Image: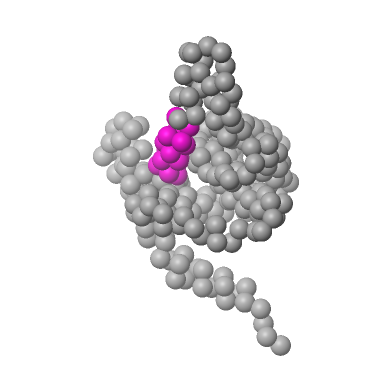
Amino acid sequence: MAMKAGSKAAGIVIDDAAVTPRYVVGLCADRELPIIIKIAKGSLKNKLLILLPGALALSLLAPWSITPLLMAGGAFLCLEGFHKVMELIRVGHHANTEEASLPLTVEELEKERVGSAIRTDFILSAEIMAITLAGVSASSIWMQATVLGVVGLGMTLLVYGAVALIVKADDAGVALTRSGTGFVRAAGRSLVRGMPIFLKVLSFVGMVAMLWVGGGILIHGLHELGVHGPEEATKSAAKSWLGQTVISAVIGLVVGALVDPLVKFVIQPLVKRFKKPKVS
């Protein structure tokens, strides 16, 4: 049951694995794994200490809210996917936003990177746990808790294990280039040269996966709420899984484009207004 529920969050997992390596870019090689371990620990706290109890409370007290919350998370994924598409179109548009606020010391930089990664992970983890909960909502509370715990632990190990392999692959390639045999050296050089291409491909796959998963969540959520038209139209337009996936991704892109001005001109100004300190 945990594998079936967790598989539905595959798109989020791919994006998480694609996004996380950027938090160790520019730092010393010997600090890469310790930073990833810190982020992984923060991710486990997010999933097991905050999101798991919150998901169980929702299941007990307000089960009707699971589908709307899942759809809200789907809309967020669509928005994030839309942003990534726009960044792909407008290369360098956001290139210097993070660099402008870098701390002065290495310790502060590391602390900021870890904190930023854990905050991003919280949003992605919330969506993973919501998708998982929706898949086991008919089970007993103890089964829900078990599945949520297994998925939370398994996804964390999967994502950050993969991230650790990705960020250390170039170091492994350099080590191979110093080996005695010509074939091993060539393999090492290919690994070093291929990792930037691999990361770009992984990022693109993560972008598409976010749009596909987000659009799919919205279509299925509407079906659960009694609006069957979008899901039926998608199935009738494309009989294959690939065709339905493409349609879901396109719908996700359109939804992201519609949500973007809502967030920029309505939600963000409201949040800033409430956060603005009152002058006494």
Residue 51 image position (x, y, % from top left)? 67, 48
Query: Does 237 appear above or below 177?
Result: below
Q: Is residue 263 visible?
A: yes
**Residue positioned 58% across, 45% down in the render:** 26
Residue 124 image position (x, y, % from top left)? 56, 47
Residue 200 in magenta stretch:
yes
**Residue positioned 29% across, 44% down in the render:** 233
**Residue positioned 57% across, 54% down in the render:** 65
Residue 36 image position (x, y, % from top left)? 66, 39
Extreme residue toward the left, this view: 237
Quadrant where the image shows the C terminus: bottom right
Foreground residue among 193 and 208 = 193
Residue 145 image position (x, y, % from top left)? 69, 38
Q: Which residues are magenta?
A: 194-210
Residue 164 in magenta stretch:
no
Quadrant where the image shows the N terminus: top right
**Residue positioned 48% across, 32% down in the render:** 195
Q: How many marks?
A: 0
